[in-house]
Amino acid sequence: MQVTCEAQIRRARCGEWRALLALFQQAAQSCSTSVDPGFFARADGHAFVQYQVEKGQVLVADRDGRLVGFCQFAPAARASVYRTDTATLELQALFVAAGERGQGLGRNLVAGFVDEARRRGLSRVSAFSDLSAHLDRVLLESGFVESRREYRLLVAYERQEQQSG
């Protein structure tokens, strides 16, 4: 039986960056990529989280005043040309606390991310997965399609809004 998600998906607030920092630390410890879990314990990690919150690039899952998940995003950087792709919003991190998983929070955070792209007038979003079967499933169930594989370590997903007409 699937439990329904009873959490509010909203933008992170500046005053809650410390609680969000704890979630970023948990995410870094549980991910299989090269994120250094110690990064978020240092001043540069604190500054990163504060900056992302101030820029409005973090959504949180708030359950009764408790942050239980987040997604972090930014305009897509295209390394091949060293500039920002302002037409695409890229999901850069998605995390749900261990005790909160399996309740639809990840899908709701991804939906909030897609809504944020629409609010910004964008019709394209992208995300990378480190071949995590769960994240891949969440992205596919949210309407993303695999667009390419890079170095056999990352899978890129994109979602394009259908033009009405």
Image: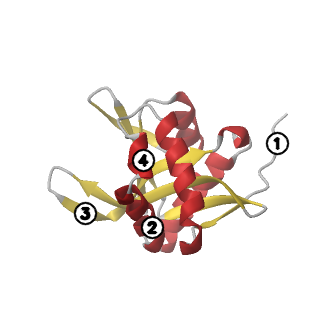
In-front residue for pair 134/31: 31
Q: CB atoms at circles 1 and 4 under 8 Å apart?
A: no
Q: CB atoms at circles 2 and 1 under 8 Å apart?
A: no
Indicate the secondary structure of the residue bearing disc 3.
strand
| First reached walking from the N terminus: tag 2 or tag 3 | 2
| First reached walking from the N terminus: tag 4 or tag 2 | 2
Indicate the secondary structure of the residue bearing disc 2.
helix
Label of residue 84 in the image? 3
Task: Decide if residue 165 is in sight here.
Answer: no
Amino acid beneath label 4: Ala
In-front residue for pair 146/72: 72
| First reached walking from the N terminus: tag 3 or tag 4 | 3
In the rendered view, does 126 fall on the left or right side of 66? left
Label of residue 50 in the image? 2
| First reached walking from the N terminus: tag 2 or tag 1 | 1
Indicate the secondary structure of the residue bearing disc 4.
strand
For disc 1, the marked residue is 3
In the rendered view, does 58 fall on the left or right side of 147? right
Label of residue 127 in the image? 4
Question: Residue at the location (45% across, 73% down)?
Answer: 54
Q: CB atoms at circles 3 and 4 under 8 Å apart?
A: no
Instruction: Give the spatial CA distance, label 4 vs label 2.
Output: 22 Å
Instruction: Give the spatial CA distance, label 1 vs label 4.
Output: 26 Å
Question: Residue at the location (52% across, 67% down)?
Answer: 116
Q: CB atoms at circles 4 and 2 under 8 Å apart?
A: no
Instruction: Give the spatial CA distance, label 2 vs label 1.
Output: 32 Å
Q: Position of residue 81 (x, y in %)?
A: 14, 55
